[in-house]
Amino acid sequence: QVQLVESGGGLVQAGGSLRLSCAVSGRTFRLYDMDWFRQAPGKERERVSAISWSGGSTYYADSVKGRFTISRDNAKNMVYLQMNSLKPEDTAVYYCAASSGGAKYDYWGQGTQVTVSS
């Protein structure tokens, strides 16, 4: 069984930064690609960023490209999302998810709230 626990959310002013963390239990962490999603009230869930199991490949949505950086530490079973130059439109609940491939998400965290004030 794999469990994902996000942390690091909070309230920040526009232009500020936050670093989200996702702690993953289970010895098979290194086999999963990891993604960050977000969902704002009344909006569909958006795939924000992803990183391959090796860390060698990353993906960013156009809306966050150049501002967010995803990384992982397989030795610590951790995934991070460094968010800089935050905007009010980044306000959402952020979720990490583990994928065994083929856009199939096997496990999800409970989410962490990010609120960016203008």
Image (spheres, helix red, strand yellow):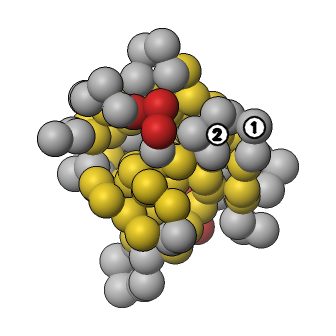
The residue closer to the viewer here, 43 or 87, is 43
Q: Which mark is residue 70?
A: 2
To which quarter of the image does residue 21 belong? top left
Relative image position of residue 71 (x, y in whole percent): 63, 32
Q: Residue at x 57, y 29 (%)?
A: 72
Position of residue 67 measured from the top left corner of the image (x, y, whole percent)? 76, 47
Would you say the residues marked 2 and 1 are in contact, meaning their CB atoms lie under 8 Å apart? no
Residue 22 in view (yes/no): yes
Pick whichever of labels 2 and 1 is earlier in the sequence.
1
Within 10 angstroms of label 2, few (less than 14), some, or many (20 or more) residues?
Answer: many
- The label shown at residue 56 is 1
Which marked residue is nearer to the observer: mark 2 or mark 1?
Answer: 1
Q: Is residue 114 visible?
A: no
Mark 1: which amino acid? Gly
Left or right: where 43 falls relative to 88: left
- State which quadrant residue 10 falls in: top left
